[in-house]
Amino acid sequence: LLQRLAHLGITLLNEELPRIYAGIHSLSTQEGTPSSAPKIARKDAKIDFSGSAQEIINLIRAMNPEPGAWTQIDNEPIRIFEARISSESVACEAGAIAKVQDSVLVGCGDERLIELHLVQPAGRKLMSASDWLRGHQQLVKFDK
């Protein structure tokens, strides 16, 4: 979405700026009462797996690319950039990690699962969740 909006903004500016400078386009003042939104803090992007799967997916999408939705495992932060709700039916408590074939699943508070796709452990590059989990077989649950 960010890339699409940036492209649309550039296209609009390229079309409208020459009209404004030539005096062909008229500008109008914005109406309504201005409002401001608070700055998103890092704590706002922390994933709480006791929430519903849809809430968690929405948080991951909203915080991508910055600041990036994150959680912790063994007191180490890990950012989650891409995930989706899974159709798998595996018993998994909130925050618990399960591996089904090549899928990395995490339990949510509504007893549904999300499947992690792209993650970034602290100090490392973006990687597939399955590659990340392959290097951490002893991990079973995200920290609270």
Image: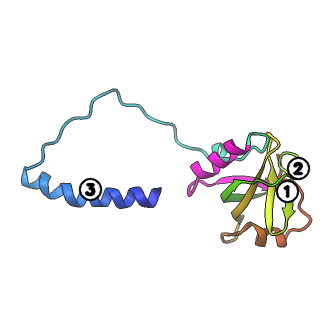
Marks 3, 2: nearer the viewer: 2
**Considering the numbered disc 1 on the image, is that residue within a helix, a strand or a loop?**
strand
**Considering the numbered disc 2 on the image, is that residue within a helix, a strand or a loop?**
loop
Name the disc covering residue 21, or none. none
Q: Earlier in the sequence, mark 1 or mark 2?
A: 2
Which residue sits furthest left?
23
In the image, is residue 109 above or below residue 23?
above
Q: Earlier in the sequence, mark 3 or mark 2?
A: 3
Amino acid on which disc 1 is placed? Ile
Q: Residue 126, image x and y in percent?
A: 66, 69
Foreground pick, 106 / 41: 106
Name the disc covering residue 92, or none. 2
Name the disc covering residue 97, or none. 1
Q: Residue 84, image x and y in percent?
A: 68, 55
Local crowd at mark 1 within 10 Å, few (<14), some, or many (≥20)?
A: many
In the image, is residue 118 above or below residue 45?
below
Q: How far is disc 1 from disc 2 in space, using C-alphas?
A: 7 Å
Residue positioned 90% across, 49% down in the render: 91
* Residue 27 on the magenta span: no
**Considering the numbered disc 3 on the image, is that residue within a helix, a strand or a loop?**
helix
In the image, is residue 101 above or below residue 114?
below
Q: Which residue is mark 3?
A: 12
Q: Earlier in the sequence, mark 1 or mark 3?
A: 3
Amino acid on which disc 2 is placed? Cys
Residue positioned 7% across, 50% down in the render: 23
Foreground pick, 10 / 104: 104
Query: Is the residue under label 2 in contact with that under label 1 (CB below 8 Å)?
Result: yes
Marks 1, 2: nearer the viewer: 2
Local crowd at mark 2 within 10 Å, few (<14), some, or many (≥20)?
A: some
Residue positioned 78% across, 45% down in the render: 49
Highlighted range, magenta: 53-73
